[in-house]
Image (cartoon, rainbow, N blue to C red):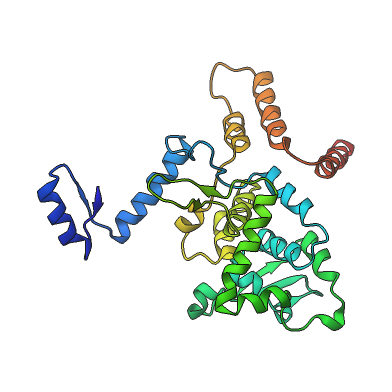
Amino acid sequence: MMDATGVGDPVFDDLRRMLPHVEGFKITAQTKRELVQGLMVAVEQRRVKWPAGSGGPLTGEELQTVSKMLEGKGEMEILFSLGYYTGARLGDCVLMRWDMIDMGARKIRYTPHKTRKSNEVITLTIHPTLFDLLDRTPKADRRGLVLPDLGKLYMTRTDVAAVSKRIQRVFEDAGIDTGLKVEGYSRAVAQVGFHSLRHAHITALLENGIPMDAVRQQAGHASLEMTARYYHASEKTLQATAHALPPISGTSGADAAGAKLEAVLTGLEGLGKEDLAKVGERVKEMMAK
């Protein structure tokens, strides 16, 4: 199957004469939507999987490893935190300015470079972890670029690649496989990079119950379909969805309660000690009512 739209149409006709089994595919707004929806279903049903040996979407463990490794590493620590806690693209994070950040109101307001023609301003509440990092900068120095050294590098065409290489080195030093070897290509295809933080951000919000349209607005996406493309359901979530379904026949009340408990326990897997402690405190408050 190949693209038979516009420029691809005559190419398809020539190829079809040599290879009769080749099928043409017309790309339209409707067929693109159908392709995305079909791919989403295929991924959810595990009919489409990440290749063996490829990292796939960043896991919680990988993100924690990167975070610990970057502690005290200055601008690179802030850059990765901006990427994960805001979901902003690399250019928007590297070129973030202090006048976009309201520390008093704990808000970030910026217009994504990719969609700047629409003049749509994205407003985010600053995550506590990111706030603490930003608050380390003395108030007298809070002007211009938040990341002056990386920002200056990024603004010169020759050094954009240098910033990307530094980012890739962070993932590699964390033991994350960033490249996927494809037969026929001498160089590995990048599968993990700074944009993976945006995927992780969107996935984390959706898995924690934030409505998709709210996530769409925060990500600056024009459609829910685009936001859905960034979502990578974890195995934990897939298990929890099964346990969360209420039984409709042949199951006792005790079994139903057990299923709900199993769903809750599945959701707690992978949480750190601090998060589990917070859950414990919340449970105590609920029991005291």
Residue 265 image offset from top left, x and y in percent: 72, 31
Q: Give the residue at x 63% y 17%.
A: 252
Residue 83 image offset from top left, x and y in percent: 66, 62
Residue 245 image offset from top left, x and y in percent: 57, 31
Front residue (pair 255, 150): 150
In the visual, does 159 lie left or right of 222?
right
Outermost residue, front direction?
A: 186
Front residue (pair 231, 17): 17
Q: Quadrant of residue 32?
A: bottom left
Q: Give the residue at x 49% y 50%.
A: 188
In the visual, does 245 lie left or right of 66?
left
Q: Give the residue at x 64% y 46%.
A: 176
In the visual, does 136 lie left or right of 45?
right
Q: Give the residue at x 83% y 81%.
A: 141
Classify 133 as above or below 257.
below
Number of marks in picture: 0
Residue 61 image offset from top left, x and y in percent: 70, 43
Outermost residue, left direction?
A: 17
Front residue (pair 65, 89): 65
Identify the image quadrant of the C terminus: top right
Classify 18 as above or below 239.
below
Classify 233 as above or below 13.
above
Q: Quadrant of residue 278?
A: top right
